[in-house]
Image: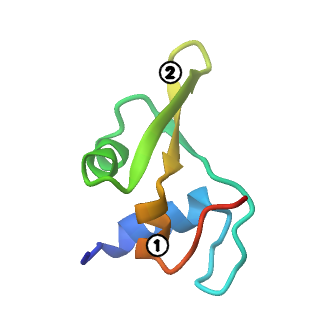
Amino acid sequence: MNLKEEHKKIIRHALGACTVTATTKRDYYCTTVGDPIAEGMVSMGLMRRGGIINGGRDQYYLATAEGAAAVGLTLPE
């Protein structure tokens, strides 16, 4: 899959791996509910929706195994 650099950065951030060689530590990315980039990544199968927080304003997005693999990482245990 040919990903935009922006998508790669979001997946790495979600996994707590801000560099390609970092070990994954977590699996979440928080942004506003309905964020178009995050929702696009859900449509591409790279992330899935998580819980909604902060009175319905923000939502967690979680990397999928496919999303992690697309940036050379694996999901944390």
Q: Which residue corresponds to the image point at 38% horizontal and 65% vertical from the top-left?
A: 7
- Which residue is the site of mark 2? 57
Q: How many marks?
A: 2
Residue that extends furthest to the front in the rendered view of this protein = 77
Question: Which badge, 1 or 2, comes first in the chain's sequence?
Answer: 2
Q: State whether residue 7 is above or below residue 38.
A: below
Q: Position of residue 47 (x, y in %)?
A: 42, 50
Secondary structure under badge 2? Answer: loop
Quarter of the rendering occupied by the N terminus: bottom left
The amino acid marked with disc number 2 is Arg
Is residue 26 found left or right of 62 in the rendered image? Answer: right
Q: Which residue corresponds to the image point at 69% horizontal and 61% vertical from the top-left?
A: 76
Is residue 7 found left or right of 23 in the rendered image? Answer: left
Is residue 47 found left or right of 45 in the rendered image? Answer: right
Q: Which mark is residue 16?
A: none
Secondary structure under badge 1? Answer: helix
The chosen color scheme is rainbow
Q: Position of residue 65 (x, y in %)?
A: 48, 60
Q: Quadrant of residue 34?
A: top left
Label 1, label 2: how many angstroms apart (C-alpha)? 29 Å
- Which residue is the site of mark 1? 69
Q: Which residue corresponds to the image point at 58% horizontal and 12% vertical from the top-left?
A: 55
